[in-house]
Image (cartoon, rainbow, N blue to C red):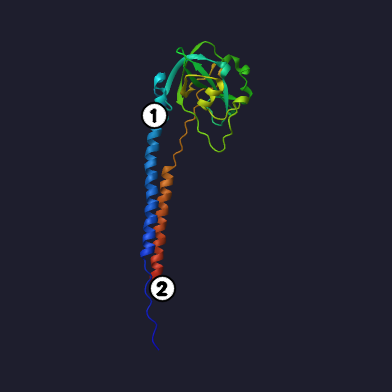
């Protein structure tokens, strides 16, 4: 009786190619996260320099159509004009960590600042708690006449799936939407940015200086995760090779 033919080892070409492709993909993701880390650190440093620089006048109205958010947001600007308090709007917010005494559920108060040349810049004068939503409760802060405001340049806020729709008819705003506010209040020649005021109004409300400067930076953690997965994949591959050598294919 003829003896059975010796078994041949299973080909390792396919699993090796698969492992190399997957490892290259994971390592590539890790390298990409390291690149994002350097970008984020540079961004944080640049914004820190912008917010602490001496305030200057914003670009002239003729340049407004060419302004870009990435180059100008958080610049420290100074503007002069007269508030149109009749067109103040309040945008709902929650401020759990405040620099001033007021925090929690409340509103950002945005008021048009009419400049001498007739152009308008929206100013986020700051935060007010729920009980101070009505301007009549903070009359001392409704300043008349020309004022000079310093603050940080901001752009229209992004919406997400959980942001309720703004309802200008009832005065319910959930985003600081420059175009929407300008349309609802009949404003013209409005800047494409608004300014977060540095200081509080007389009487303490609205409470200024509450710009949220939080930039999550988890890129190093993500990079270690991808590199760790690549290392784990290599370990699995080595274990597979050793098993194949001990248990040849039947």
Mark 2: give few (<14), some (14-19) or many (20+) Cα within 10 Å.
few
Q: Position of residue 210 (x, y in %)?
A: 51, 26
Question: Compared to 5, does 22 lie above or below?
Answer: above
As drawn, which residue projects farthest toward the top? Answer: 145
Give the residue displayed 41% in from the left and 57% down from the top: 233
Q: Quadrant of the N terminus?
A: bottom left
Res. 65 in view: yes
Q: Earlier in the sequence, mark 1 or mark 2?
A: 1
Find residue 249 and name its label.
2
Q: Position of residue 42 (x, y in %)?
A: 37, 35
> Label 2 near label 1: C-beta < 8 Å?
no
Question: Compared to 242, does 153 lie above or below?
Answer: above
Question: Compared to 208, does 26 lie above or below?
Answer: below
Q: Classify residue 14 by image quadrant.
A: bottom left
Q: Nearer the viewer, residue 31 or 1?
A: 1
Secondary element at tag 1: helix
What whole-number distance in Å separates the C-alpha atoms at marks 1 and 2?
62 Å
Q: Nearer the viewer, residue 162 or 97?
A: 162
In-image side of 150 versus 186 (left or right): left
Q: Position of residue 16 (x, y in %)?
A: 37, 62
Q: Quadrant of the C terminus?
A: bottom left
Secondary element at tag 2: loop
Res. 126 in view: no
Give the residue displayed 58% in from the left and 14% down from the top: 140
Q: Position of residue 21 (x, y in %)?
A: 37, 56
Q: How many numbered discs?
A: 2
Mark 1: give few (<14), some (14-19) or many (20+) Cα within 10 Å.
few
Q: Which residue is mark 1?
A: 71
Find residue 97 and name its label.
none
Give the residue displayed 56% in from the left and 21% down from the top: 185
């Amino acid at each position: 009786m003829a003896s059975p033919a010796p078994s041949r080892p299973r080909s390792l070409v396919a699993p090796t190619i698969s492992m190399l492709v997957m490892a290259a993909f994971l390592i590539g993701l890790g390298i990409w996260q390291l690149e994002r880390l350097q970008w984020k650190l540079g961004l944080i440093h640049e914004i820190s320099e912008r917010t602490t620089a001496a305030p200057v006048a914003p670009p002239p109205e003729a340049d407004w159509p060419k302004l870009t958010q990435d180059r100008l947001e958080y610049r420290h600007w100074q503007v002069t004009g007269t508030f149109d308090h009749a067109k103040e709007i309040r945008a709902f917010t929650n401020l759990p960590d405040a620099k001033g005494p007021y925090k929690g559920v409340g509103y950002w108060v945005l008021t048009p600042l009419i400049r001498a040349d007739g152009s308008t810049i929206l100013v986020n004068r700051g935060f007010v708690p729920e009980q101070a939503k009505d301007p009549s409760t903070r009359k001392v802060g409704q300043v008349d006449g020309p004022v000079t405001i310093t603050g940080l340049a901001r752009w229209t806020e992004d919406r997400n799936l959980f942001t309720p729709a703004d309802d200008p008819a009832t005065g319910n705003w959930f985003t600081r939407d420059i175009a929407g506010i300008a349309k609802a209040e009949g404003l013209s020649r409005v800047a494409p940015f608004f300014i977060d005021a540095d200081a509080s109004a007389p009487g303490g409300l609205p409470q200024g200086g509450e710009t949220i400067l939080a930039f999550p930076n988890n890129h190093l953690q993500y990079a270690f995760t991808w590199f760790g997965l690549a290392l784990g994949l290599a370990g699995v591959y080595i274990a597979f090779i050793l098993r194949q050598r001990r248990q040849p294919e039947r």
